[in-house]
Image (cartoon, rainbow, N blue to C red):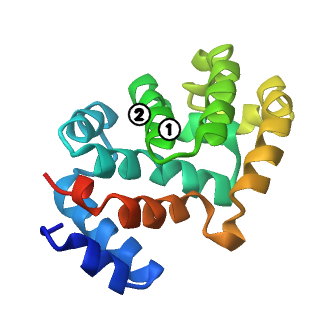
Amino acid sequence: MTTDGRLIVDAMTADEVGEAIGQELDRRLPGLDDLDAYVACLEALPIGLRSIAAIYQLDVSLALDDLGWHFGNWHHHGYAQETARGLRVLGAQRAAELFEAAYGEALRCWDRLGASDWMEWYHDSPLEAAVDPLNREIWNLYPSSSGGLLRLWVEYARAHPDLLSV
């Protein structure tokens, strides 16, 4: 953002803010096919963009699946740590606690989540049962119908437009 970033962000609709952030992240980040490289790129971003980028896939997971499924799709310790940190930076303390609790449950069967058939295993698994109450709480806090976790993007950008730039 420029030095008058606050004026620009405040004049934009929430959708426009989200789109501008998404375009900036697309410009700065590689694809997600190599999570080691992706996490390394996250670490080079300003804290605001870093945090915003780190929670994006979690938002998608919560809209389509659940916390346990997220760790099967995004089976990477560094990325999980970035996601938890991002939630905290963006002010979602309770969501970070729920995510970290789910990560703790996922760690108990981490190798199983890394297997090629984890999707077949997951349904009716001990992990799915363990994260169910965590899912219910995070879905209540950040329902997809109200913008999910991505509403944090707009709130953060409006509060800290200067922290989105280098």
Q: CA distance from mark 1 to mark 2?
A: 10 Å
Q: Report which quarter residue 63 is drawn in.
A: bottom right
Q: Which mark is residue 82?
A: 2
Could you classify mark 2 by the number of other residues whose Cα lies within 10 Å: few (under 14), some (14-19), or many (20 or more)? Answer: some
Q: Which residue is mark 1?
A: 88
Q: Residue at x 29, y 30 (%)?
A: 36
156 up-or-down from 46: above or below: below
Q: Which mark is residue 115?
A: none
Q: Which is more foreground, mark 1 or mark 2?
A: 1
The percent coordinates of residue 98 (x first, y second) are 69, 34
55 up-or-down from 27: above or below: above
Say what amino acid the circle numbered 1 marks: Arg
27 up-or-down from 48: above or below: below
The residue closer to the viewer here, 80 or 5, is: 5
The residue closer to the viewer here, 149 or 66, is: 149
The residue closer to the viewer here, 121 or 161, is: 161
Say what amino acid the circle numbered 2 marks: Glu
Label located before the other in sequence (1 or 2): 2
The percent coordinates of residue 134 (x first, y second) are 78, 37
Q: Residue at x 64, y 41 (%)?
A: 95
The percent coordinates of residue 1 (x first, y second) are 18, 66
